[in-house]
Amino acid sequence: MTDLLNVQNLVKRFGDNTVVNDLSFHIAPGECLGVIGPNGAGKTTTLRMCLGLTTPDAGSMTYFGNLRMPHDALAIKSRLGVVAQMDTLDPDFTAEENLLVYGRYFGMKDREIKARIAPLLEFGALTSKAKAKPGELSGGMKRRLSLSRALINHPQMLLLDEPTTGLDPQARHLMWERLQMLMQEGKSILLTTHFMDEAERLCDRLLVLDHGQKIAEGKPRDLISQHLEPDVVEVYGQGALALAAPESALRQHAARVEVSGETVFFYTAEAQPLLMALQHWPHLRSLHRPANLEDLFLKLTGRQIRENA
Protein backbone atom coordinates (compact mmCIF):
# COMPACT_ATOMS: atom_id res chain seq x y z
CA MET A 1 0.00 0.00 0.00
CA THR A 2 1.11 3.56 -0.69
CA ASP A 3 2.37 5.40 2.38
CA LEU A 4 0.16 8.26 3.54
CA LEU A 5 3.29 10.18 4.49
CA ASN A 6 6.86 9.62 3.35
CA VAL A 7 9.58 11.86 4.81
CA GLN A 8 13.09 11.71 3.37
CA ASN A 9 16.29 13.29 4.72
CA LEU A 10 14.59 16.16 6.51
CA VAL A 11 16.90 18.88 7.86
CA LYS A 12 16.11 22.04 9.81
CA ARG A 13 18.61 24.52 11.25
CA PHE A 14 18.10 27.59 13.39
CA GLY A 15 21.33 29.53 13.12
CA ASP A 16 24.18 27.18 14.03
CA ASN A 17 21.81 24.75 15.76
CA THR A 18 20.65 21.75 13.70
CA VAL A 19 17.27 20.87 15.23
CA VAL A 20 16.35 18.10 12.78
CA ASN A 21 19.19 16.20 11.14
CA ASP A 22 18.67 13.91 8.10
CA LEU A 23 15.40 12.44 9.38
CA SER A 24 13.48 9.87 7.34
CA PHE A 25 10.29 7.95 8.22
CA HIS A 26 6.95 6.86 6.77
CA ILE A 27 3.39 6.19 7.88
CA ALA A 28 1.28 3.47 6.28
CA PRO A 29 -2.53 3.55 6.02
CA GLY A 30 -4.17 2.67 9.34
CA GLU A 31 -0.91 2.99 11.28
CA CYS A 32 -0.10 5.01 14.40
CA LEU A 33 3.51 6.21 14.46
CA GLY A 34 4.70 7.63 17.77
CA VAL A 35 7.56 10.11 17.99
CA ILE A 36 9.29 10.20 21.38
CA GLY A 37 12.39 11.94 22.65
CA PRO A 38 13.61 14.39 25.31
CA ASN A 39 12.66 18.05 25.31
CA GLY A 40 14.49 19.73 22.46
CA ALA A 41 14.87 16.50 20.47
CA GLY A 42 13.11 17.99 17.42
CA LYS A 43 9.64 16.44 17.76
CA THR A 44 7.54 19.58 17.46
CA THR A 45 9.78 21.07 14.75
CA THR A 46 9.34 17.87 12.72
CA LEU A 47 5.57 18.07 13.13
CA ARG A 48 5.56 21.74 12.12
CA MET A 49 7.49 20.91 8.95
CA CYS A 50 5.04 18.12 8.18
CA LEU A 51 2.25 20.72 8.47
CA GLY A 52 4.00 23.28 6.30
CA LEU A 53 4.32 25.70 9.23
CA THR A 54 8.13 25.55 9.22
CA THR A 55 10.17 25.38 6.03
CA PRO A 56 12.84 22.65 5.99
CA ASP A 57 16.37 23.44 4.86
CA ALA A 58 16.60 20.11 3.05
CA GLY A 59 14.62 16.94 2.46
CA SER A 60 11.19 16.07 1.12
CA MET A 61 7.71 15.27 2.46
CA THR A 62 5.25 13.41 0.23
CA TYR A 63 1.61 12.82 1.24
CA PHE A 64 -0.93 10.41 -0.21
CA GLY A 65 1.42 9.16 -2.89
CA ASN A 66 2.02 12.27 -4.98
CA LEU A 67 1.36 15.47 -2.99
CA ARG A 68 4.42 17.34 -1.79
CA MET A 69 4.68 19.70 1.15
CA PRO A 70 4.85 22.71 0.94
CA HIS A 71 4.06 22.87 -2.81
CA ASP A 72 0.66 21.16 -2.39
CA ALA A 73 0.02 22.44 1.14
CA LEU A 74 -3.66 23.34 0.67
CA ALA A 75 -4.55 20.01 -0.94
CA ILE A 76 -2.69 18.15 1.80
CA LYS A 77 -4.19 20.10 4.70
CA SER A 78 -7.69 19.47 3.40
CA ARG A 79 -7.09 15.78 4.15
CA LEU A 80 -5.42 16.19 7.55
CA GLY A 81 -6.71 16.62 11.08
CA VAL A 82 -4.51 18.47 13.57
CA VAL A 83 -4.51 18.72 17.38
CA ALA A 84 -1.84 21.19 18.44
CA GLN A 85 0.07 21.10 21.70
CA MET A 86 -1.52 24.37 22.83
CA ASP A 87 -5.27 25.01 22.99
CA THR A 88 -6.46 26.74 19.77
CA LEU A 89 -10.20 26.71 20.44
CA ASP A 90 -12.01 30.02 19.93
CA PRO A 91 -13.00 31.19 23.44
CA ASP A 92 -15.93 33.26 22.15
CA PHE A 93 -17.70 30.35 20.46
CA THR A 94 -19.61 27.45 22.00
CA ALA A 95 -18.46 23.89 21.41
CA GLU A 96 -20.82 23.42 18.48
CA GLU A 97 -19.92 26.83 17.05
CA ASN A 98 -16.22 25.92 17.19
CA LEU A 99 -16.98 22.90 15.01
CA LEU A 100 -19.18 24.91 12.64
CA VAL A 101 -16.64 27.67 12.04
CA TYR A 102 -13.75 25.23 11.67
CA GLY A 103 -15.65 23.25 9.06
CA ARG A 104 -16.14 26.42 7.02
CA TYR A 105 -12.35 26.78 6.77
CA PHE A 106 -12.40 23.64 4.61
CA GLY A 107 -15.08 25.01 2.32
CA MET A 108 -17.73 22.69 3.72
CA LYS A 109 -21.39 23.70 3.43
CA ASP A 110 -23.17 24.56 6.69
CA ARG A 111 -25.69 21.77 6.13
CA GLU A 112 -22.91 19.20 5.84
CA ILE A 113 -21.10 20.56 8.90
CA LYS A 114 -24.24 20.65 11.06
CA ALA A 115 -24.93 17.02 10.18
CA ARG A 116 -21.54 16.14 11.66
CA ILE A 117 -21.67 18.27 14.82
CA ALA A 118 -23.89 16.01 16.95
CA PRO A 119 -21.99 12.78 16.11
CA LEU A 120 -18.63 14.46 16.75
CA LEU A 121 -19.76 15.91 20.08
CA GLU A 122 -21.02 12.45 21.02
CA PHE A 123 -17.67 10.98 19.97
CA GLY A 124 -15.95 13.43 22.33
CA ALA A 125 -18.43 12.69 25.17
CA LEU A 126 -19.46 16.34 24.94
CA THR A 127 -23.13 16.18 23.93
CA SER A 128 -24.23 17.94 27.11
CA LYS A 129 -21.63 20.68 26.53
CA ALA A 130 -22.76 21.72 23.04
CA LYS A 131 -23.72 25.23 24.23
CA ALA A 132 -20.73 25.64 26.57
CA LYS A 133 -17.78 27.85 25.70
CA PRO A 134 -14.20 26.56 26.13
CA GLY A 135 -13.75 28.58 29.33
CA GLU A 136 -16.51 26.47 30.92
CA LEU A 137 -14.85 23.16 30.00
CA SER A 138 -12.28 21.11 31.89
CA GLY A 139 -8.86 20.44 30.39
CA GLY A 140 -9.91 16.97 29.27
CA MET A 141 -13.08 18.30 27.66
CA LYS A 142 -11.10 20.92 25.74
CA ARG A 143 -8.72 18.27 24.40
CA ARG A 144 -11.63 16.06 23.31
CA LEU A 145 -13.30 19.06 21.67
CA SER A 146 -10.03 19.80 19.83
CA LEU A 147 -9.94 16.18 18.64
CA SER A 148 -13.59 16.27 17.56
CA ARG A 149 -12.95 19.53 15.70
CA ALA A 150 -9.95 17.95 13.92
CA LEU A 151 -12.30 15.29 12.51
CA ILE A 152 -14.82 17.72 10.97
CA ASN A 153 -13.30 17.41 7.47
CA HIS A 154 -13.17 13.57 7.37
CA PRO A 155 -9.33 13.53 7.53
CA GLN A 156 -7.37 10.52 6.31
CA MET A 157 -4.59 11.23 8.76
CA LEU A 158 -4.27 12.92 12.16
CA LEU A 159 -1.23 14.81 13.46
CA LEU A 160 -1.34 15.06 17.25
CA ASP A 161 1.27 17.01 19.22
CA GLU A 162 1.28 15.75 22.84
CA PRO A 163 -2.54 15.49 22.90
CA THR A 164 -2.85 14.44 26.58
CA THR A 165 -0.29 16.73 28.23
CA GLY A 166 -1.75 18.32 31.37
CA LEU A 167 -4.63 15.88 31.70
CA ASP A 168 -5.43 13.84 34.80
CA PRO A 169 -5.35 10.02 34.52
CA GLN A 170 -9.11 9.67 33.94
CA ALA A 171 -9.08 12.26 31.14
CA ARG A 172 -6.02 10.66 29.55
CA HIS A 173 -7.66 7.23 29.51
CA LEU A 174 -10.80 8.65 27.90
CA MET A 175 -8.67 10.38 25.25
CA TRP A 176 -6.83 7.10 24.61
CA GLU A 177 -10.15 5.32 24.17
CA ARG A 178 -11.22 7.85 21.54
CA LEU A 179 -7.91 7.57 19.66
CA GLN A 180 -8.16 3.77 19.67
CA MET A 181 -11.67 4.08 18.19
CA LEU A 182 -10.23 6.18 15.35
CA MET A 183 -7.50 3.63 14.66
CA GLN A 184 -10.11 0.86 14.54
CA GLU A 185 -11.83 2.93 11.85
CA GLY A 186 -8.60 2.92 9.84
CA LYS A 187 -7.31 6.43 10.58
CA SER A 188 -3.56 6.96 10.43
CA ILE A 189 -1.96 8.95 13.26
CA LEU A 190 1.35 10.74 13.75
CA LEU A 191 1.65 11.26 17.50
CA THR A 192 4.27 13.02 19.62
CA THR A 193 4.18 12.23 23.33
CA HIS A 194 6.17 12.34 26.56
CA PHE A 195 4.11 9.52 28.10
CA MET A 196 5.71 6.14 27.55
CA ASP A 197 2.57 4.25 28.59
CA GLU A 198 0.67 6.26 25.98
CA ALA A 199 3.21 5.39 23.30
CA GLU A 200 3.13 1.69 24.15
CA ARG A 201 -0.67 1.61 24.32
CA LEU A 202 -1.41 3.47 21.09
CA CYS A 203 1.51 3.19 18.68
CA ASP A 204 2.18 0.47 16.11
CA ARG A 205 5.71 1.80 15.64
CA LEU A 206 7.95 4.26 17.45
CA LEU A 207 10.49 6.77 16.23
CA VAL A 208 13.00 7.74 18.94
CA LEU A 209 14.63 11.13 18.40
CA ASP A 210 17.54 12.75 20.19
CA HIS A 211 19.40 15.89 19.15
CA GLY A 212 17.31 15.95 15.98
CA GLN A 213 18.40 12.50 14.83
CA LYS A 214 16.63 9.15 14.65
CA ILE A 215 18.34 6.83 17.13
CA ALA A 216 15.85 3.95 17.00
CA GLU A 217 12.72 2.88 15.14
CA GLY A 218 10.44 -0.13 15.40
CA LYS A 219 7.53 -1.76 17.21
CA PRO A 220 7.49 -0.95 20.95
CA ARG A 221 7.98 -4.52 22.19
CA ASP A 222 10.62 -5.22 19.53
CA LEU A 223 12.63 -2.17 20.60
CA ILE A 224 12.43 -3.22 24.23
CA SER A 225 13.68 -6.75 23.46
CA GLN A 226 16.45 -5.42 21.17
CA HIS A 227 17.89 -2.87 23.57
CA LEU A 228 17.08 -4.08 27.10
CA GLU A 229 17.40 -7.01 29.44
CA PRO A 230 13.94 -8.50 30.12
CA ASP A 231 13.83 -7.94 33.90
CA VAL A 232 14.35 -4.87 36.06
CA VAL A 233 14.75 -4.77 39.84
CA GLU A 234 14.45 -1.33 41.42
CA VAL A 235 15.99 -0.96 44.88
CA TYR A 236 15.47 2.08 47.08
CA GLY A 237 15.73 3.08 50.72
CA GLN A 238 18.51 4.20 53.04
CA GLY A 239 21.80 2.65 51.90
CA ALA A 240 20.51 1.53 48.50
CA LEU A 241 23.05 3.61 46.57
CA ALA A 242 25.91 1.60 48.08
CA LEU A 243 24.62 -1.44 46.16
CA ALA A 244 25.51 0.31 42.90
CA ALA A 245 29.18 0.59 43.84
CA PRO A 246 31.63 -1.37 41.62
CA GLU A 247 32.55 -3.65 44.52
CA SER A 248 28.93 -4.51 45.36
CA ALA A 249 28.20 -8.24 45.36
CA LEU A 250 24.84 -7.61 43.71
CA ARG A 251 26.48 -6.43 40.49
CA GLN A 252 27.40 -10.00 39.55
CA HIS A 253 23.68 -10.73 39.17
CA ALA A 254 22.99 -7.81 36.80
CA ALA A 255 23.97 -7.12 33.22
CA ARG A 256 23.69 -3.39 33.81
CA VAL A 257 23.20 -1.08 36.80
CA GLU A 258 21.92 2.50 36.72
CA VAL A 259 21.19 5.07 39.40
CA SER A 260 18.50 7.75 39.30
CA GLY A 261 18.02 9.87 42.41
CA GLU A 262 17.82 7.49 45.37
CA THR A 263 16.87 4.43 43.29
CA VAL A 264 19.20 1.77 41.88
CA PHE A 265 18.05 -0.07 38.75
CA PHE A 266 19.40 -3.58 38.16
CA TYR A 267 18.82 -4.86 34.61
CA THR A 268 19.07 -8.62 34.30
CA ALA A 269 18.10 -11.61 32.19
CA GLU A 270 17.33 -13.63 35.34
CA ALA A 271 16.01 -11.76 38.37
CA GLN A 272 15.70 -14.62 40.88
CA PRO A 273 19.37 -14.76 42.02
CA LEU A 274 19.33 -10.99 42.50
CA LEU A 275 16.10 -11.11 44.50
CA MET A 276 17.52 -13.88 46.68
CA ALA A 277 20.68 -11.87 47.33
CA LEU A 278 18.60 -8.82 48.29
CA GLN A 279 17.24 -10.72 51.29
CA HIS A 280 20.50 -9.79 53.04
CA TRP A 281 19.27 -6.16 53.04
CA PRO A 282 15.77 -6.56 54.56
CA HIS A 283 15.49 -2.83 55.33
CA LEU A 284 15.58 -1.95 51.61
CA ARG A 285 12.50 -1.92 49.42
CA SER A 286 12.50 -3.41 45.95
CA LEU A 287 10.28 -3.72 42.91
CA HIS A 288 10.64 -6.47 40.32
CA ARG A 289 9.05 -5.73 36.94
CA PRO A 290 9.51 -6.36 33.21
CA ALA A 291 11.48 -3.83 31.20
CA ASN A 292 9.30 -1.15 29.63
CA LEU A 293 9.42 1.78 27.22
CA GLU A 294 10.52 4.18 29.93
CA ASP A 295 13.63 2.04 30.47
CA LEU A 296 14.24 2.09 26.73
CA PHE A 297 13.79 5.85 26.55
CA LEU A 298 16.22 6.45 29.42
CA LYS A 299 18.82 4.05 28.07
CA LEU A 300 18.80 5.61 24.61
CA THR A 301 18.53 9.27 25.61
CA GLY A 302 20.00 9.34 29.14
CA ARG A 303 18.65 10.28 32.56
CA GLN A 304 20.10 13.78 32.59
CA ILE A 305 17.51 16.56 32.48
CA ARG A 306 18.02 18.82 29.46
CA GLU A 307 18.58 22.33 30.82
CA ASN A 308 18.23 23.90 27.37
CA ALA A 309 14.88 22.28 26.61
Image (spheres, rainbow, N blue to C red):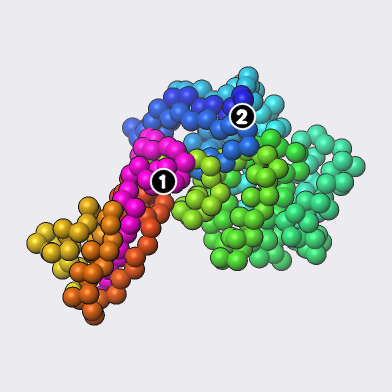
Q: Position of residue 118 (x, y in %)?
A: 83, 53
> Is any part of residue 14 visible from this angle?
no
Mark 2: secondary structure: loop
- Determine the image quadrant of residue 129: bottom right
Q: Alpha-carbon distance for marks 1 and 2? A: 23 Å
72 sits to left or right of 110 = left
Report the residue at 28% width, 61% height from top.
271
> Is any part of residue 12 visible from this angle?
yes
98 sits to left or right of 139 = right
> Is residue 221 shown in magenta?
yes
Q: Position of residue 278 (x, y in %)?
A: 22, 71
Report the residue at 20% width, 69% height from top.
277
Q: Which residues are magenta?
A: 211-238
203 sits to left or right of 221 = right
**Circle 1 Cα neighbour tier, 10 Å, few/some/many (<14 / 14–19 / ≥20):** many
Mark 2 — residue?
4
Q: Is residue 35 above or below residue 174?
A: above
Q: Which comes before the other along the chain, label 1 or label 2? A: 2
Q: Position of residue 132 (x, y in %)?
A: 77, 63
- Determine the image quadrant of residue 51: top right
Q: Residue furthest bottom?
A: 283
Mark 1: secondary structure: loop
Mark 1 — residue?
37
Report the residue at 34% width, 68% height from top.
287
Q: Which is closer to the viewer, label 1 or label 2?
A: 2
Report the residue at 39% width, 47% height from top.
224
**Viewer-nearest residue: 292 or 116:** 292
